[in-house]
Image (spheres, coloured by chain):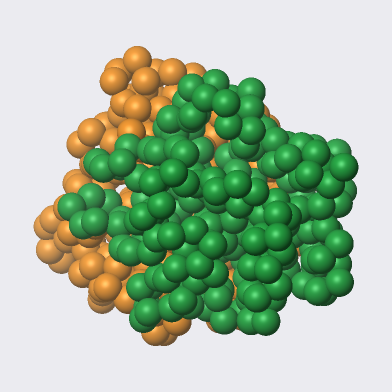
Amino acid sequence: MIVVIDYNVGNVKSVCGAFRHLGYESELSCEPKVVEDAWGLVLPGVAAFGYAINALGSLAGLIKELATGGKPLLGICVGYQMLFDESSEYGRHEGLGLISGKVVPIPSGRVIPHMGWNLVELPEDMDLFTGLGEERHFYFAHSYCAEVSDEQARIAYTDYGFDLVASVQKGNIYGVQFHPEKSGNHGLQVLKNFHEICRKSAT
Amino acid sequence: MLTRRIIPCLDVKDNRVVKGVNFLNLRDAGDPVELGARYSDEGADELVFLDITATIRSRDTIVDLVERVAENVFIPFTVGGGIYTVEHMDTLLRSGAEKVSVNTAAVENPGLLAEAAKRFGNQCVVLAIDARRSTKQQGKWIVTVKAGTEPTDIDAVEWAVRGEQLGAGEILLTSMDADGTKAGYDNELNKAITDAVNIPVIASGGAGKLDHLYDAIIDGNADAVLMASITHFGNYNIRQMKEYLRDRGIPMNL
């Protein structure tokens, strides 16, 4: 079963609701034992970075250990941003350091937050985007974005006057800046694909 | 490229969707969850649920409604009406809302915007402004509060700028003069606000025809257009609106 990390931030229930809608079981939990036994982990989040990383507390170490050990992990929005080394949102905060990069303000000269549906160019042959074709609209809502120094990890971009990294993957670690749980049927497909990744990894 | 958004607004009173003219003479428009799901199926980019009784009667917005919507609708939605504290926002966001909107509460306590932005990120914090044309000064709009029942002496453009500085991540701008009239958006107001701030602005109030939506985007420079009467009472469905705008060269998620 997939475990959605419950760490007292917004929108965690929407991810569980999306899995339920797809006919998959998932559990919302912050219990270390439950997290350890999961097929895979989703780290969702609607929050400011500093608030989120503090709310994660001691679970941060466990998630890092499990992800490094091969358990599939999907970070969404601020959960995606926490995969990187650090963020400068309301002060400097350390992230999980699973993927090299840092979270910085979206460059000025455009409407910020980047809010709404933007077209994401999808890579071929990436299991997270199976069945979605070359490009799809997904829902974004963020004022900070990741500067991903690990070039190999960048797998999808969107155009917001610059190439904004929309998704990363490093082995079993996945992240999406957009909200698949709020991106209609195409977003649900991403969650379905992640479920498949987790199921394969568990068997 | 980022698309412009079409956002149906569901004004909720006693668990029913209602719609009036200039905030008065309410008509029943259906069940909020069913209507929300229908709009999502038709291709709505987002939904806004406003608990229109909350401010006046000072009761809590319906957490239960938010949970039911989140179970059934997989597009973003904003909830507003009677939200006065960060704890209340937290409950609504945890229940599945993507954003919360504040209006009277922010006027009474502007620090709420800053507090909310620091905790949830500014992308969660929508400042709703109900603006009315000033009878004293031409080309000026004043902010009204308590669901449009009380005028203030605050200039709407100045308030929008201050709201952005405090931490609002979006403005839901309703023209009280145009609301429910189906005579078109107040694009002078929309333009005055979109010129003054750098956060997205949702234009609201007055949509009656498809070209009104186009005008709000082109003349008003609105990032998103919100409507109620024309969708609830069957004049146009969301897909028709999006196809019309796409055919006139506006990027749409279709």
Nearer-the-camera pick, A13 or A100: A100
Residue ranking furthest to the top: B247
Q: Does residue A33 appear left or right of residue B84 in this picture?
A: right
Residue sitting at 44 percent across and 44 percent down? A152
Question: Residue A199: x and y, percent?
Answer: 82, 42
Residue ranking furthest to the front: A69
Q: Quadrant of residue A148?
A: bottom left
Nearer-the-camera pick, A191 or B22: A191
Residue sitting at 32 percent across and 37 percent down? A159
Q: In which quarter of the image is residue B33?
A: top right
Chain letter, colour green: A
* In the depicted structure, whether residue B149 falls above or below residue B196: below
Q: Quadrant of residue B237?
A: top right
**Chain B display color:** orange
For the question of whether residue B170 can be seen, the reply is no
* In the depicted structure, whether residue A172 falls above or below residue B50: above
